[in-house]
């Protein structure tokens, strides 16, 4: 004989307790509960692991990314500026215009001077006989020719606006300058050679008596500077141009 089944009402009253009393554990329900809870927790942990891996990859890739190249500095260009020694301003003006300290030497200018001067002790430039400088325009012109350049004497009756600046290597001015004896300035004047040229898009006064190059500025400011200098007494201007420019007269912009 089998056991009699519970009436429907009693089954409902006993519910899960009845199952436990019968030794029937609701393992499926507990498995689903436990399994569902474990699945949610694992899923959350897996999501956190994925996020952590993404962050690690992101930080790793950013660390592997090469740093951005530094921006170029806007430092001014290097300018060669030869300072005054003895009375060698002609030498300094030439080297400053060519931006090269080896362009000309005192010995080279002295050799040119000796070649141009008459073979006599009577000379208007006695100091030049000793190689101390004070060279005149003839020495400058001859020195330029040894490098394939010419010195064009500028007629002060013409305006400097007619100079084709792009075809001019540089400028050499001959201006009155006070004589010095050490730190003392003497009440005497002597002609002095000054180099002027463009470096890095800016024109500079490269007077060897200056402590450092003095910026003049743009082409318009250069013309203003030259006009002011030429208004002075006993001031002359030489254009330093290549032999080809001189041959075709292309240092002039007015034909």
Image (cartoon, rainbow, N blue to C red):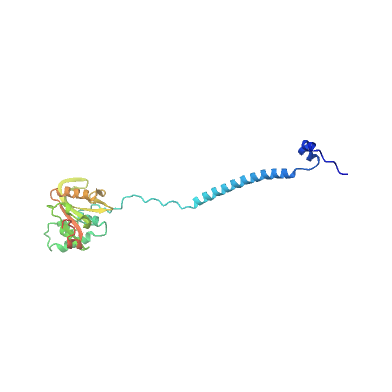
Toward the viewer: 136 or 168? 168
Residue 250 lies in what quarter of the image? bottom left
Which quadrant is the C terminus positioned in? bottom left
Of all residues, the one furthest to the right in this rendering is 1
Toward the viewer: 89 or 49? 49
Toward the viewer: 155 or 173? 155
Q: Quick check: 39 left or right of 60?
A: right
Q: Quick check: 52 left or right of 167?
A: right
Of all residues, the one furthest to the front in this rendering is 8
Going 62% across and 46% down the picture, which residue do you hit? 43
x and y percentages locating residue 25 in the rendered image: 77, 43
Placement of 75 over or under 110, stated as above or below: above
Toward the viewer: 184 or 166? 166
Which quadrant is the N terminus positioned in? top right
x and y percentages locating residue 196 in the rendered image: 22, 53
x and y percentages locating residue 83 in the rendered image: 25, 52
Does the rendering let one see residue 177? no
x and y percentages locating residue 96 in the rendered image: 24, 55
């Amino acid at each position: 004989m089998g056991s009699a089944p519970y009436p429907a009402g009693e089954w409902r009253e006993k519910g899960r307790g009845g199952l436990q009393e019968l030794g029937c554990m609701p393992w499926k329900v507990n498995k689903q509960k436990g399994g569902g809870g474990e699945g949610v927790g694992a899923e959350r942990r897996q999501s956190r692991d994925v996020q952590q891996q993404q962050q690690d990859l992101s930080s790793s890739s950013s660390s592997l990314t090469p740093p951005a190249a530094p921006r170029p500095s806007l430092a001014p260009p290097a300018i060669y500026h030869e300072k005054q020694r003895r009375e060698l301003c002609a030498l300094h003006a030439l080297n400053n215009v060519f931006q090269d300290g080896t362009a000309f030497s005192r010995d080279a200018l002295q050799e040119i001077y000796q070649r141009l001067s008459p073979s006599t002790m009577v000379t208007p430039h006695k100091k030049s006989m000793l190689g101390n400088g004070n060279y005149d325009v003839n020495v400058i012109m001859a020195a330029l020719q040894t490098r394939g350049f010419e010195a064009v004497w500028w007629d002060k009756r013409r305006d400097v606006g007619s100079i084709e600046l792009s075809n001019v290597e540089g400028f050499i001015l001959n201006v009155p300058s006070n004589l010095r004896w050490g730190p003392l300035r003497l009440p005497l004047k002597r002609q002095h050679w000054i180099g002027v040229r463009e470096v890095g898009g800016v024109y500079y006064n490269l007077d060897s008596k200056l402590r450092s190059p003095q910026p003049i500025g743009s082409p318009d400011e250069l013309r203003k500077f030259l006009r002011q200098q030429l208004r002075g007494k006993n001031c002359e201007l030489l254009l330093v141009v290549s032999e080809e420019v001189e041959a075709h007269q292309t240092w002039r912009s007015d034909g």
